[in-house]
Amino acid sequence: MNGRLAFLAFAFWALWTAGCNLKEESSTPWIPVLEKTDFNYLESAVSRATKAVEEAMNSFQNGTKNESKAMQLARESLLELELYYVPMTKVRQLIYDADRLYYLGENDQMKTDLLEANKILTRITESRIYNLESSVNELILMIDELVLKLNESSPDVHKAFRKVGYRTNMMLVKGELIMSGQDFITERIE
């Protein structure tokens, strides 16, 4: 009986001590990990593929109607990648990095990333893809609003980052919907 009582007392003490140790551990704030990202591999792969399809189209003058249409669809898909999806992926990474930089207190780099995101978005609107201007310009305005909140040290900065990040992500996830019925230019943009 004494052995059982001693065992129960020891078990109770061990559980209580473990519980106290868990409770005493301090909760540290989240420190985001920031790794430098680069999309050159993706941009160059898409550029090479687009060039190869264009060369194939130029040398493929006597193909059947179905073959010509297939080549045109391949070219349009590559242009979507080159002129929308890859730049928007870069914008999303810049927005997420800016959010992390904000919490790390690296404000100069954060503002540089937001400025670069707006430059990329401006290039999308200037790439002569019909009817994308309104969607992209709305995101540009949201980023401008975020920068204003940052300059004012607004308490709503976190919400603004979430809103911009969500919008950017949705523009990628719903890219086909945003671009539905869009005609990509027939001349390749350099």
Image (cartoon, rainbow, N blue to C red):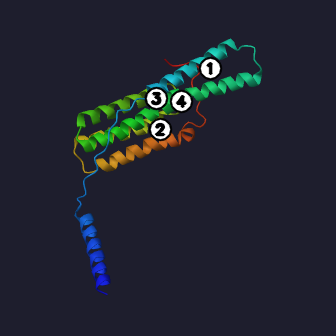
Task: From the top left corner, tell me how far across and down residue 48 is, in percent.
Answer: 54, 20
- For discs 2 and 3, the disc positioned in front in the rendered view: 3
- The answer, for residue 126, to whether it is visible in the render is no
Kind of residue sitting beneath label 4? Leu
CA separation in Å, label 3 and label 4? 12 Å
**Separation (CA) of disc 4 from disc 2:** 17 Å
Location of mark 3 (residue): 124
Q: Describe the element under mark 4 as helix, strand or loop.
A: helix
Q: Can see residue 90?
A: yes
Q: Label 4: few (<14), some or many (≥20) within 10 Å?
A: some
Labels 3 and 4 touching (C-beta < 8 A): no
Q: Which mark is residue 81?
A: 4
Which of the two labelled residues, at mark 3 and mark 4, occupies the earlier sequence position?
Answer: 4
| 68 or 17: nearer the viewer | 17
Give the x, y percent position of residue 25.
24, 60
- Which label is found at residue 112? none
Residue at 24% across, 68% down? 20
The label number, if any, that marks residue 53 in the structure image:
1
- Of helix, strand and loop, which one carries label 1? helix
Task: Give the left or right position of residue 42, taking residue 112 as reference.
Answer: right
**Sequence-wise first label, 2 or 1:** 1
The mark nearer the N terminus, 1 or 3, is 1
State which tag comes first along the sequence, 4 or 2: 4
Residue at 22%, 45% (x, y): give it: 153
Disc 4 versus disc 1: distance between alpha carbons? 13 Å
Find disc 2 in the rendering and name its residue.
135
Residue at x-position 35% and y-position 30%: 116
